[in-house]
Every structure is written in structure tokens, then in C-alpha cells.
């Protein structure tokens, strides 16, 4: 970073209590020493952040752009069946009081000092450091030991102004606890979102965590997600990307003790000139751990997808059972997917599998549906929805599942008949 950029970023740090200011300054120094990830780095070779970085520097320099005048609100999905926390442009739109026993919700960054050790040690990436330096909104969710939270907790971050936001979610699931948590990003403007989610599952905890991203087609969205699973804990993880001009997800999972189990399903839909990059790192650090990962990508028009998944089995992680698969549909001649599932195994008594498939819609299936009077566009949509159904059916609530289903169907209808589908 140049001297001028360093001065701009340093002068823009938010005013906070001294202890947290020191944490911010340390995080900013780490970010400035490394800068934005670039395409010369192996894990970033297919994703260019230069346009996002330029926009972000403008937001930081221009206080008016940084705060952003409120714009059109998203048609944000909420449900009475869930406990909803809604943030609009970083400001809570709902209170933090809940009637759920054993559930504690604390606002960030006001409680950042209290949870500083968790916020500063989970991830060394420069984007996570940038999030910590400018942290402006988020929550700490604590689930007490031996507690089952009956209603899903639905956290919505809605961007209505052209600004950069730095949401953070910290989840601590206590021993033998159970909960469903949904993180939902929406927006209507050319915003930047630099998000971090940290999840700690204590022994025996069972957590369902789901993230849905449907920001504006002019938005940039980068997210770091870090999971730490203790003995006999279980996390069912879902990630769906339907929006943003460019989206990047870095998911790191650490299965730290025996019996830890992690399952994940993901869907990314890219069309026009959108770009979605998914990176997954599964670290089996102890024996008798299990993971399953299924990523499904749909690329149309000039849409570009990236998937890189790594199963890393440590030396002492005997009896590991892990599988990683990426399946993709290319719907147009100009669409593209770069996929690389990997294994790195240092134990000798394991069961691991990985693979990737990429193809087009089956012409025979399309003909079969048309022969029964179904219009071509509708038949295409049915086949694509069928491809995505394995992921969509995992959505925790009926209302959100229907919302996402309609969003996918609308995007498919917008593709029309001129997408080069065969």
C-alpha cells in the first residue's frame, strides 16, 4: 500500500474505546502491510479484486460515500417463525431482546472489547484484518450449555446505500446445545461487503448455519467463515450465492476433536458477467472425524464460477471419513467454471473421496419434457431447478426456502431463450 493510501485508511478509523482502538490499529497495520489479495497468489488466481479495492478506497476517502445516503430498501424476507435481527446500512432496525431462554445476543462493535480475543485470533487473512479494523455492525450470539433454541435466528444485513460495510457474526454454541442460525445479505446498490463469521461449537453442540447472499448486481461481496468443532459436535452448513457482481467465500473448517462432524451444501448461480469464487478448506485434525461437502454451480451467459476445495487430513487423524464433490452446469458458450478439488492426506487409515463434474443440460430430458407439451423455457427451468434441488431442500425454514426458490426461478426466467442453451 502506498504512503497516501496508508494515511487515508489510518485517518478513517472509527472512534472507539482505547482498548479496541489498539485492536483496530493492529488489524489495519496487518492489512496495510499485505494489501488486498491479488491474482499472483495461487488462491486468488481467478479472482481480481482491483475494482473492489478502488471502490473501497473511494468510500474510505470520501466520508459522504462512506456513510452513504439511504437508497431504496430491499424487499427483505422476514418471517414470524424466526427470531429476526435486521440491520440496514449497519444500523439495527430491530431490537436485541429475545424471549428464547439460553440465547444471548450482544451488538458489535460495542461489545468488541469484551470479545477481542475471539475477533483477533481466528483468521490471518488480510480481508479479515480489514473487517476488524473498520468493524461497524454485527452480533455475538451465545447459546447456553444444554439449551435448544426452538425458533431459527435470522440475521439480515441490508445495504441500501453505496458504501462499504464490515459485518461480523460471532457464534458460540455451548455444550450439548442446538440451534438454527441464518445469515442473510441483501442490497440494492453498488456497495462493498467485507464480512466475517466465526463459529465455535463446544462438545456435543449441534448447529445448523445457513448463509444466503442476494445483494445487488453491482455489489462486491467477500466473506471469510471460520468454524471450530470440538468433540462430538456437529455443524450442518449451507451457502447460497444468487447476487453480487463479484462474490468470494473463504470457508475454513477445523475438526479439532474426535467425533466432530461437518456437512455442507452450496449453490452458486452466475449469469450476465457475474463472478462467484468458493474456497473450502477442511482440516481433519483429530481421529474419527467426518465431513461431507457438495457444491453445485450454475453458469449462464458470461457468468464465471470458481471452486477450490481441499481435504487436509493431519498425521494423527486416523479413521477420517471425508468426501468433497463439485457439480456444475454450463448453460451458455460464454460461461466458465474453474474447479479444483484436492486431497492432502498424512494419515494411513482414512476414507476420503473427491471429484468434479461439469456438463450441459441433457438434450434427451429436455426433449422428453417438450414432447409432453411443456414449453422449452419452462422445461429448461425445471431441469435446472432439479439440479439445484438437493441444495435448496436443505434450507431450514419453509418461508425462506420458498423465497429462494422464487428468486432462482426469476433469475432463470430472465435468461430467456437467447442464452445459447442447448
Image (spheres, rainbow, N blue to C red):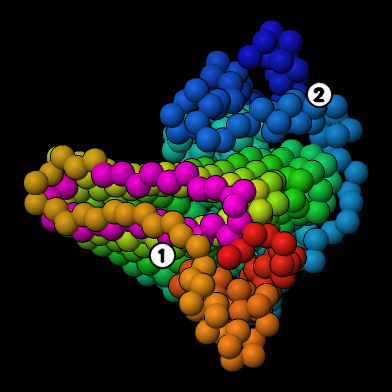
Write down the residue under mark 1.
236
Residue 321 drawn in magenta? yes
Q: Main secondary structure of the magenta part?
A: strand
On screen, residue 270 above or below 75: above
Write down the residue under mark 2.
61
Residue sitting farthest toward the bottom: 372
Give me the residue at 32% from left, 61% from top. 292
Which residue is at the front of the view, 209 or 138?
209
The reply, left or right, for residue 377 in relation to residue 319 is: right
Please state the extent of the stretch shown in magenta in the rendering. Answer: 316-343
Mark 2 or mark 1: whose residue is earlier in sequence: 2
Q: Secondary structure at mark 2?
A: helix
Instruction: For the C terminus, give its image quadrant.
Output: bottom right
Give me the residue at 32% from left, 54% from top. 355
In the image, residue 229 lies at what x, y percent? 33, 53
Which residue is at the front of the view, 22 or 85?
85
Q: Quadrant of residue 379?
A: bottom right
How far apart are labels 2 and 1 at the CA level? 40 Å
Q: Secondary structure at mark 1?
A: strand
Evaluate whether residue 211 shows in this view.
Answer: no
Amino acid at each position: 500500500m502506498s504512503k497516501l493510501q496508508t494515511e487515508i485508511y489510518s485517518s478513517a478509523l472509527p472512534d472507539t474505546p482505547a482498548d479496541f482502538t489498539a485492536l483496530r490499529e493492529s488489524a489495519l497495520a496487518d492489512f496495510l502491510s499485505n494489501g488486498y489479495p491479488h491474482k499472483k497468489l495461487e488462491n486468488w488466481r481467478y479472482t481480481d479484486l482491483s475494482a473492489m479495492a478502488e471502490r473501497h478506497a473511494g468510500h474510505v476517502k470520501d466520508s459522504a460515500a462512506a456513510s452513504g445516503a439511504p437508497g431504496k430498501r430491499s424487499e427483505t424476507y422476514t418471517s414470524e417463525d424466526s427470531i429476526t435481527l435486521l440491520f440496514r446500512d449497519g444500523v439495527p432496525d430491530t431490537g436485541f431482546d429475545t424471549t428464547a431462554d439460553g440465547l444471548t445476543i450482544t451488538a458489535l462493535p460495542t461489545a468488541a472489547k469484551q470479545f477481542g480475543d475471539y475477533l483477533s485470533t481466528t483468521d490471518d487473512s488480510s480481508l479479515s484484518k480489514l473487517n476488524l479494523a473498520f468493524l461497524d455492525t454485527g452480533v455475538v450470539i451465545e447459546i447456553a450449555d444444554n439449551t435448544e433454541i426452538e425458533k431459527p435466528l435470522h440475521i439480515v444485513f441490508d445495504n441500501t446505500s453505496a458504501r462499504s460495510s464490515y459485518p461480523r457474526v460471532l457464534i458460540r454454541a455451548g455444550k450439548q446445545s442446538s440451534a438454527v442460525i441464518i445469515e442473510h445479505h441483501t442490497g440494492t446498490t453498488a456497495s462493498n461487503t467485507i464480512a466475517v463469521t466465526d463459529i465455535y461449537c463446544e462438545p456435543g453442540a449441534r448447529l445448523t448455519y445457513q448463509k444466503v447472499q442476494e445483494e445487488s448486481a453491482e455489489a462486491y461481496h467477500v466473506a471469510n467463515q471460520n468454524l471450530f468443532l470440538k468433540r462430538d459436535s456437529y455443524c450442518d452448513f449451507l451457502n447460497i450465492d444468487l447476487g453480487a457482481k463479484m462474490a468470494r467465500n473463504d470457508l475454513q473448517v477445523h475438526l479439532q476433536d474426535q467425533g466432530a462432524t461437518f456437512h455442507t451444501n452450496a449453490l452458486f448461480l452466475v449469469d450476465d458477467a457475474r463472478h462467484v469464487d468458493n474456497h473450502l478448506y477442511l482440516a481433519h485434525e483429530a481421529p474419527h472425524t467426518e465431513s461431507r461437502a457438495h457444491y453445485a454451480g450454475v453458469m449462464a451467459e458470461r457468468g464465471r464460477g470458481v471452486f477450490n476445495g481441499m481435504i487436509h487430513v493431519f498425521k494423527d487423524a486416523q479413521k477420517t471419513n471425508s468426501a468433497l464433490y463439485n457439480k456444475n452446469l454450463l448453460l451458455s458458450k460464454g460461461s466458465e467454471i474453474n474447479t479444483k478439488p484436492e486431497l492432502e492426506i498424512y494419515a494411513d487409515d482414512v476414507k476420503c473421496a473427491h471429484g468434479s463434474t461439469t456438463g450441459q443440460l441433457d438434450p434427451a430430458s429436455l426433449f422428453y419434457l417438450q414432447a409432453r407439451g411443456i414449453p422449452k423455457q419452462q422445461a429448461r427451468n425445471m431441469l435446472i431447478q432439479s439440479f439445484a434441488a438437493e441444495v435448496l431442500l436443505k434450507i431450514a425454514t419453509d418461508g425462506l426456502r420458498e423465497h429462494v426458490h422464487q428468486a432462482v426461478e426469476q433469475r432463470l426466467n430472465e435468461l430467456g431463450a437467447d442464452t445459447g442453451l442447448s
